[in-house]
């Protein structure tokens, strides 16, 4: 199957699984459930589910089993976007080409949407997964919790908020993004591996790969924020500069940021060498992350 066909297939599977996992809009409290579905369905690249499926396939994981960690990590990602867009955070009005949750509904509802999506992620991942031992599933829950909390995504967001108006060093910026963006991307890769027969040395190589593409994703995001239009991005272009937030572009300059993206891309590819042709989808996703224009 060609990469774009495979990607479309996984995106469609993910959309169906998310639609099933989310409460129907007509179930009370209807407004909250409507807002949850509004914030999750019908948009996004689904990069994290794609990474989960691509990694799981290397180790012979059942595609039906992979759907569950794939939607769990996507629900965490969706909740983080809803909260990031709030006035007390990034104060944005556009996400995925439509009004942000707090604009379409209200701030209190958006706050509850994030809370509910986070708990739904763990509810989904705690359900019985055929063929996986309970101990392994507990490890997966712990992995996702660590990636989402104060030592992962939420901690990275705290560093990001504290950095507004300050000039960070490159190492400080990378620390922030290893947590804010990279932790959930790393979890996506490792959750997929845990659904199959991945050995410890394989997990080590995958951890390095995931760290590289986590940073790569953010460098490309910073470049797009500088070069792409709001219409192309589906979110407000140039908002990081407007908010005086540190980025790879304003620390390194646009040319060097692009050079860094190129180095990270190559490092990510190199780290997949032990897996041979079985890692083709991860290679393709690495290139997709670099070459995307939204």
Image (cartoon, rainbow, N blue to C red):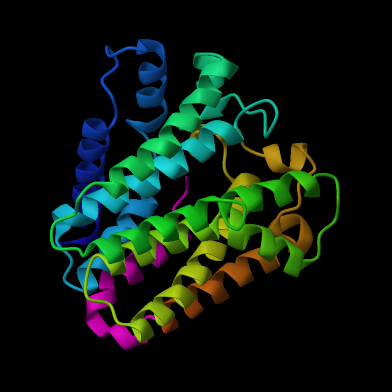
Q: Is residue 68 visible?
A: yes
Is 115 above or below relative to 132? above
Front residue of 41/136: it is: 136
> Which image quadrant for residue 240?
top right
Residue placed at 70% from the left, 47% from the top? 158
Q: Which residues are magenta?
A: 272-294
Is 271 above or below relative to 232? below
Chief secondary structure of the magenta portion: helix
Would you say residue 34 sits in the magenta stretch?
no
Is 69 above or below relative to 265? above
Would you say residue 293 sits in the magenta stretch?
yes
- Residue at the limit of the structure toward the front, as seen here: 135
Residue placed at 32% from the left, 52% from the top? 49
Position of residue 279 in the picture relative to residue 112 (left or right)? left
Where is residue 178 drawn, in percent x and y?
60, 63
Position of residue 50 in the picture relative to residue 81 (left or right)? left
Residue placed at 78% from the left, 61% from the top? 251
Where is residue 11 drawn, in percent x and y?
26, 46
> Which image quadrant for residue 17?
top left
Where is residue 73 drawn, in percent x and y?
39, 49
Front residue of 60/214: it is: 60
Front residue of 101/75: it is: 75
Is 201 above or below relative to 56? below
Where is residue 231 drawn, in percent x and y?
51, 32
Report how many numbered discs are placed on residues in the image: 0
Front residue of 116/71: it is: 116
Position of residue 210 in the picture relative to residue 137 (left or right)? right
Q: Is residue 100 visible?
A: no
The quarter of the picture where the N terminus appears is bottom left
């Amino acid at each position: 199957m060609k990469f774009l066909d495979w990607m479309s297939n996984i995106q469609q599977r993910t959309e169906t699984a998310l639609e099933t996992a989310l409460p129907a809009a007509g179930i009370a409290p209807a407004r909250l459930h409507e807002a949850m579905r509004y914030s999750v369905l019908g948009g996004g690249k689904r990069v994290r589910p794609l990474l989960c499926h691509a990694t799981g396939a290397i180790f012979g994981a059942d595609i039906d089993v992979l759907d569950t960690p794939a939607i769990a990590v996507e629900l965490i990602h969706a909740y983080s976007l809803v909260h990031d867009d709030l006035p007390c955070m990034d104060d944005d009005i556009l996400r995925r080409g439509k009004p942000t949750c707090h604009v379409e509904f209200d701030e209190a509802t958006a706050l509850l949407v994030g809370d509910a999506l986070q708990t739904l992620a763990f509810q989904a991942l705690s359900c019985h997964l055929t063929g996986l031992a309970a101990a392994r599933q507990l490890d997966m829950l712990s992995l996702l919790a660590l990636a989402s909390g104060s030592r992962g995504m939420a901690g990275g967001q705290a560093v990001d908020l504290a950095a507004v108006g300050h000039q960070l060093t490159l190492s400080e910026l990378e620390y922030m993004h290893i947590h804010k963006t990279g932790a959930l991307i790393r979890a996506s890769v490792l959750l997929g591996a845990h659904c199959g027969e991945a050995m410890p040395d394989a997990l080590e190589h995958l951890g390095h790969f995931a760290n590289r593409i986590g940073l790569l994703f953010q460098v490309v995001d910073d470049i797009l924020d500088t070069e792409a239009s709001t219409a192309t991005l589906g979110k407000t272009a140039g908002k990081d500069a407007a908010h005086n937030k540190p980025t790879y572009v304003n620390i390194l300059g646009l040319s060097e940021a692009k050079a860094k993206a190129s180095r990270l891309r190559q490092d990510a590819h190199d780290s997949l060498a032990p897996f041979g042709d079985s890692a083709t989808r991860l290679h393709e996703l690495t290139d997709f992350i670099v070459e995307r224009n939204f």
